[in-house]
Image (cartoon, rainbow, N blue to C red):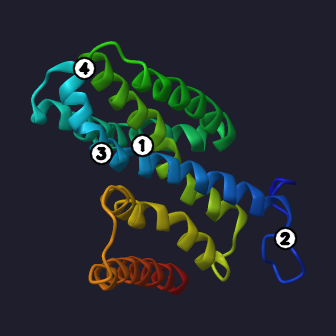
Amino acid sequence: MQHALFERGADGAPCGPSQLVDMVLNLWVLSLTYSSTAYVASVPALIGRFGVSRTVALLGVTLQVLGFAAGPLIFGPSSELYGRRPVYTACGLFYSAFAFGVCFAPSMAGLLVFRFLVGFFGSAQINNVPASIGDFSTPANRGPYSIVCESPALLSPLGPQHALTPLSPSQMPSVLSEARHSVHCVLHSSKLTLAT
């Protein structure tokens, strides 16, 4: 049964609130993918504040990515059993709470635990947003939604790397080439999705 939020126009394309839902879900994906890479910019400050080695400071990236791997084992099946909305609601609440924990962690150990939990609960968005897109789109019109969904994951590493240092004109072709390659990969994967 089609949920009322996912209405379709005469051509079968999603219309109305489903586009707003898609935008909100994709902003959520963007926030998580950006937070996983933006953390690297804070490593020198963490070393100074907590007096830890660079390796320990960088462990925050590793633990968040480990959370990305562990969360889908629970949240993928849960979203099929209980629905996407309860999983999004619970994971969004915990993701936000633990993100504040990262900000105000009193020790490096606490920060690392919170980073893992942010990745764990945030993984619901990386895992379930493509499934939600499948819920409100058809294979014929899924491509643009998939491109928007996957772009943050492919393009967010460009953000912190280039935000910390100003780009010279000689670096622009390299950055544009990286972005073009990422978009090409997403377009190619959406064509494969449409073909199947």
Q: Give the labeled residue for mark 1.
A: 72
Q: CA distance from mark 1 to mark 2?
A: 29 Å
Q: Give the labeled residue for mark 3.
A: 41
The answer to whether residue 93 is above or below residue 110 is: below
Q: Are marks 1 and 2 in contact (CB under 8 Å)?
A: no
Q: Which mark is residue 8?
A: 2
Q: CA distance from mark 4 to mark 2?
A: 49 Å
- In this rendering, which labeled residue sits more in front, label 4 or label 2? 4
Q: Earlier in the sequence, mark 1 or mark 3?
A: 3
Q: CA distance from mark 3 to mark 4?
A: 16 Å
Q: Earlier in the sequence, mark 4 or mark 2?
A: 2
- In this rendering, which labeled residue sits more in front, label 3 or label 4? 3
Mark 4 lies on a secondary structure that is helix
Mark 2 lies on a secondary structure that is loop
- In this rendering, which labeled residue sits more in front, label 3 or label 2? 3
From the viewer's perspective, is 129 left or right of 48? right
Q: Amino acid at mark 2?
A: Arg
Q: Earlier in the sequence, mark 4 or mark 1?
A: 1
Q: Amino acid at mark 3?
A: Ala
Q: Which mark is residue 108?
A: 4
- In this rendering, which labeled residue sits more in front, label 4 or label 1? 4
Seen at 90% across and 81% down, the residue is 10
